[in-house]
C-alpha cells in the first residue's frame, strides 16, 4: 500500500535531521490512534524490523549548514508498506491527525490531506528502480562497536548490500523463500552516487540513483513496497519503478 501525505509547516525551516522529525510524527500519530499498535511497533522489541519505508519531497528547498529552508512550508510525505495492516493503520492514524497542529522540534506540523497512490504491478524477473530516498548499505555489528557505510559501486559494498537484502527478505518472506533470495542479482547504474544524510545526529553515507534488480517477481514486489536494505523504516531505501 502506498500513500502521499501533504504536511504544512508553520515555519519555513526544519532541522537537517528531517527523518527524525517525521519519525516523531509517526509515533505521535500511531500512539494517538492506537496505543497497542504503537507499542507493538516501537516498544515490544528493540530495533524491530518494520515492513514500511518513506521518503520526503520538499519542493524548491535549500540545504543550509544545519537546517533546510522550505519556502513553500510544505512537505510531501511518501509512505509505502508490504504489510496491509501497517498500511491501514498508517492511513487511519494520519487521518485522525488531519488538521491538528503537532508541535515537533521548534515547528508546528499540520496534516492537510492524505491520498492513496496506485501501485504498479511487477510480473517480470527484472526491474529498474530509482531511489526516492537513499539506500543505506550498512555493515554493522550488534554491539554498535563498529559500523561501516558502503558505496553500491564498490565490490565490498555490493557484497554487504546483498547480505542486507538476504537478512531483510528472510525476515519478511520467511525461510521458504531463501533459495530465491540467494539468487538475487543487481546492477547499480553508473550514475549512482553517494550522499551524506544526517540521521539522529550522525552523518550517514548512502546511495541515490538507479539500480537494476533481477529476482522472482514476488521478491521484487516486496522490495518495491517495503523498501530496500538497512534503516528503511527510518526514511531510507524507498524505491520507485522506472
Image (cartoon, rainbow, N blue to C red):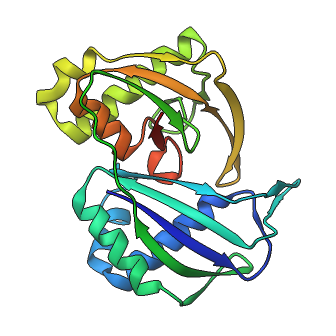
Total marks placed: 0
Residue 115, located in which quarter of the rendered image?
A: bottom left
Q: Residue at x 64, y 24 (%)?
A: 192
Q: Residue at x 73, y 83 (%)?
A: 10
Extreme residue in the bottom direction: 100
Q: Residue at x 55, y 81 (%)?
A: 112
Picture coordinates of residue 106 (x, y %)? 75, 79
Picture coordinates of residue 22 (x, y %)? 57, 65
Q: Nearer the viewer, residue 54 or 114?
A: 114
* Left or right relative to 49: residue 237: right
Q: Residue at x 64, y 66 (%)?
A: 75
Picture coordinates of residue 122 (x, y %)? 28, 34
Up the image or down, 68 lies above or below 49; here it is below
Up the image or down, 105 lies above or below 139; here it is below
* Left or right relative to 94: residue 51: left
Q: Nearer the viewer, residue 158 or 78?
A: 78
Extreme residue in the right direction: 65
Give the quarter of the figure containing the N terminus: bottom left
Amino acid at each position: 500500500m502506498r500513500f502521499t501525505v501533504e504536511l504544512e509547516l508553520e515555519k519555513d525551516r526544519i532541522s537537517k535531521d528531517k527523518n527524525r522529525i517525521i519519525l516523531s510524527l509517526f509515533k505521535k500519530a500511531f500512539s494517538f490512534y492506537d496505543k497497542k499498535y504503537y507499542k507493538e511497533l516501537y516498544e515490544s522489541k528493540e530495533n524491530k524490523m518494520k515492513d514500511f519505508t518513506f521518503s520526503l519531497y520538499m519542493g524548491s528547498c535549500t540545504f543550509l549548514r544545519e537546517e533546510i529552508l522550505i519556502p513553500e512550508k510544505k512537505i510531501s510525505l511518501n509512505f509505502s508498506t508490504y504489510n496491509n495492516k501497517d498500511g491501514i493503520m498508517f492511513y487511519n492514524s494520519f487521518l485522525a491527525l488531519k488538521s491538528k497542529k503537532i508541535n515537533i522540534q521548534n515547528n508546528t506540523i499540520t496534516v492537510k490531506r492524505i491520498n492513496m497512490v496506485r501501485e504498479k504491478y511487477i510480473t517480470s524477473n527484472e526491474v529498474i528502480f530509482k531511489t526516492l530516498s537513499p539506500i543505506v548499505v550498512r555493515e554493522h555489528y550488534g554491539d554498535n562497536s563498529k559500523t561501516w557505510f558502503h558505496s553500491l559501486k564498490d565490490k565490498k559494498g555490493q557484497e554487504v548490500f546483498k547480505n542486507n537484502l538476504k537478512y531483510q527478505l528472510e525476515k519478511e518472506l520467511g525461510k521458504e523463500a531463501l533459495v530465491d533470495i540467494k539468487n538475487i542479482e543487481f546492477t547499480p547504474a553508473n550514475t549512482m552516487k553517494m550522499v551524506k544524510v544526517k540521521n539522529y545526529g550522525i552523518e550517514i553515507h548512502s546511495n541515490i540513483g538507479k539500480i537494476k534488480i533481477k529476482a522472482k517477481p514476488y521478491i521484487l514486489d516486496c522490495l518495491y513496497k517495503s523498501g530496500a536494505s538497512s534503516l528503511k523504516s527510518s526514511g531510507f531505501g524507498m524505491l520507485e519503478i522506472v
